[in-house]
């Protein structure tokens, strides 16, 4: 049997996933079941778009529940010891300047399950994180991105 993928994450990230799972199981699942009941009451299911839509939502919710359960079951929590280094790694917040224009950016490197780039949380599987991991403050790093290669200097690691 192949081992399941592991999902590195912070304790807070795992808690967030557990809360989302609880919401889906206790609230969203019931809402979808109720929509299916209402749509069934409209009669002929072969031409019932409300029923089809509700069944699609049900499949999405059940898929999301299954995915979250797998992530939580296979979570690998990043410990404080792993965070107490001065090099870029999982759970660390890194600030860097893009060269030559010196535009500063700050990201926290998290596991793929927690990633939310709009919130400054990038996956450890992303090109930026992969290039930065293992480097320290002051290091210049070349990052291969889909838009081409960029060069950055690490300003801070927390």
Image: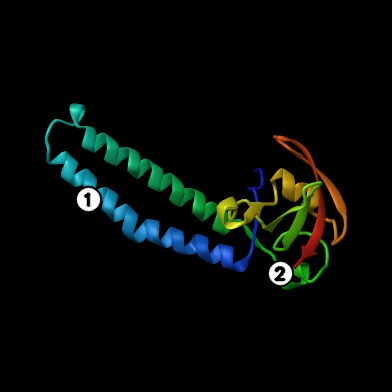
Q: Is residue 30 left or right of residue 98?
A: left
Question: Above or below — where is 94 with respect to 58?
Answer: below
Q: Residues within 10 Å of mark 1 (few under 14, many from 20)?
A: few
Q: Which residue corresponds to the image point at 39% horizontal and 60% vertical from the top-left? A: 23
Q: Which residue corresponds to the image point at 87% horizontal and 51% vertical from the top-left? A: 140
Regarding mark 2 in the picture, which secondary structure is present there?
loop
User: Which quarter shows the C terminus?
Assistant: bottom right
Of marks 2 and 1, which one's residue comes earlier in the chain?
1
Camera-nearest residue between 115 and 27: 115
In the image, residue 78 lies at what x, y percent? 69, 65
Snapshot quadrant of residue 75: bottom right
In the image, residue 45 lies at what x, y percent? 18, 31
Looking at the image, the residue that sits furthest to the top is 46
In the image, residue 80 lies at what x, y percent? 73, 72
Snapshot quadrant of residue 58: top left
In the image, residue 94 lies at what x, y percent? 74, 60
Q: Residues within 10 Å of mark 2 (few under 14, many from 20)?
A: few
**Numbered badge on residue 79:** 2
Question: Above or below — where is 12 with respect to 110?
Answer: below
Q: Which residue corresponds to the image point at 19% horizontal and 27% vertical from the top-left? A: 47
Q: Is residue 122 left or right of residue 34?
A: right
Regarding mark 1 in the picture, which secondary structure is present there?
helix
Question: Contact, CB < 8 Å: mark 2 with mark 1?
Answer: no
Snapshot quadrant of residue 71: bottom right
User: Which quarter shows the N terminus?
Assistant: top right
Residue topped by disc 1: 34
Q: CA distance from mark 2 to mark 1?
A: 42 Å
Question: Above or below — where is 101 with respect to 81?
Answer: above
């Amino acid at each position: 049997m192949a081992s399941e993928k592991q999902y590195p994450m912070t304790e807070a990230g795992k808690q967030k996933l557990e809360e989302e799972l609880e919401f889906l199981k206790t609230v969203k699942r019931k809402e979808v079941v109720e929509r299916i009941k209402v749509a069934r009451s409209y009669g002929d299911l072969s031409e019932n778009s409300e029923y089809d839509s509700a069944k699609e939502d049900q499949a999405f919710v059940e898929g999301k529940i299954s995915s979250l359960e797998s992530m939580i079951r296979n979570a690998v929590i990043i410990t404080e010891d792993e965070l107490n280094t001065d090099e870029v790694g999982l759970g660390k917040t890194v600030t860097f300047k893009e060269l030559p224009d010196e535009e500063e950016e700050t990201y926290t490197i998290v596991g793929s399950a927690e990633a939310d780039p709009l919130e400054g949380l990038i996956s450890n599987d992303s090109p930026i994180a992969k290039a930065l991991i293992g480097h320290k403050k002051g290091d210049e790093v070349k990052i291969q991105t889909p838009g081409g290669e960029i060069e950055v200097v690490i300003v801070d690691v927390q």
